[in-house]
Amino acid sequence: AQKITQTQPGMFVQEKEAVTLDCTYDTSDPSYGLFWYKQPSSGEMIFLIYQGSYDQQNATEGRYSLNFQKARKSANLVISASQLGDSAMYFCAMRELPYNNNDMRFGAGTRLTVKP
Amino acid sequence: DAGITQSPRHKVTETGTPVTLRCHQTENHRYMYWYRQDPGHGLRLIHYSYGVKDTDKGEVSDGYSVSRSKTEDFLLTLESATSSQTSVYFCAISLGQAFTGELFFGEGSRLTVL
């Protein structure tokens, strides 16, 4: 069964600095997608970024980028120029293709705190 | 906005009582999911549905049942609630194969079983 590991329960970063949140995954399927979600203190789950296993380029969405190292099975989220509003819980997730036939599995999450 | 609403948003109940959580969507999506969120576990799939009257079990389905009699509503039922079912429950939809597989979530329902 696929497994997602986020080894950092909590992280601190200074405002305006970059931060990397780690995620490793385990799957024997060559076709999958990797996802990151943000959960602020209000509780909603916000989709941030997606990376397909066959994508050649690392995904980017504004200040978010995904550092995808397929051979190492890692999919780290990089947040550039941190803002106070980035303080939240962040979840890494994976889903094998075909997506709608497969569960999205989540890591335990990393709580990011941005310091002013 | 994926047009998902969950009700109730908060509920406190006693052990042994039945509880039903409702997920309502306004955009006719075929695939719907129920997850629970617990500290240290992230989100785990309880049940999902791939159409009216078509449902299947997820990773943590014991003690839960679901029903989908209309496209727009996906109900999660705890027949006899236990304290271990105290959790935050999220409904989600998937936008179909044409998209990149991300799920869009409702606001969550916080359930406390005393």
Image (spheres, coloured by chain):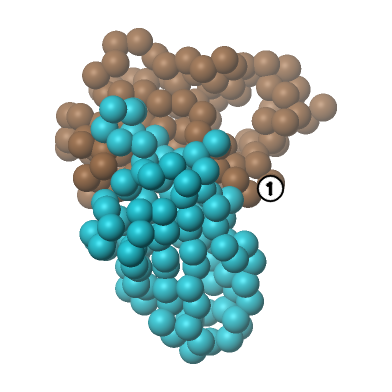
Q: In this view of the protein, which residue sits in the foreground, B52 or B83?
A: B52
The answer to whether any part of residue B99 appears in the image is yes
The answer to whether any part of residue A74 appears in the image is no
B37 up-or-down from B104: above or below: below
Q: In this view of the protein, which residue sits in the foreground, A112 or B2?
A: B2
Residue located at (58% from left, 51% from top): B107
Q: Colour of chain A?
A: brown
Residue B68: percent from left, percent from top:
34, 63
Residue located at (68% from left, 47% from top): A42
Please identify the quarter of the rendering in which residue A34 is found: top left
Residue located at (51% from left, 87% from top): B17
The quadrant the C terminus of chain A occupies is top right
Count of all numbered marks drawn on residues in the image: 1
Q: Is residue B42 left or right of residue B48?
A: right
Residue A10: percent from left, percent from top:
61, 41
Q: Colour of chain B?
A: cyan
Residue B18: percent from left, percent from top:
48, 83
Label 1 resides on the chain identified as A
B96 up-or-down from A2: above or below: above
B60 up-or-down from B95: above or below: below
What amino acid type should be assigned to the residue bearing mark 1? Answer: Ser
Q: In this view of the protein, which residue sits in the foreground, B91 or A54?
A: B91
Residue A105: percent from left, percent from top:
35, 46
User: Which class describes the residues within 10 Å of circle 1: few (<14), some (14-19), or many (20+)?
Assistant: few
- Dot 1 lies on which element? loop
Q: Is residue A66 left or right of residue A8?
A: left
Please identify the quarter of the rendering in which residue B72 is found: bottom left
Location of mark 1 (residue): A42
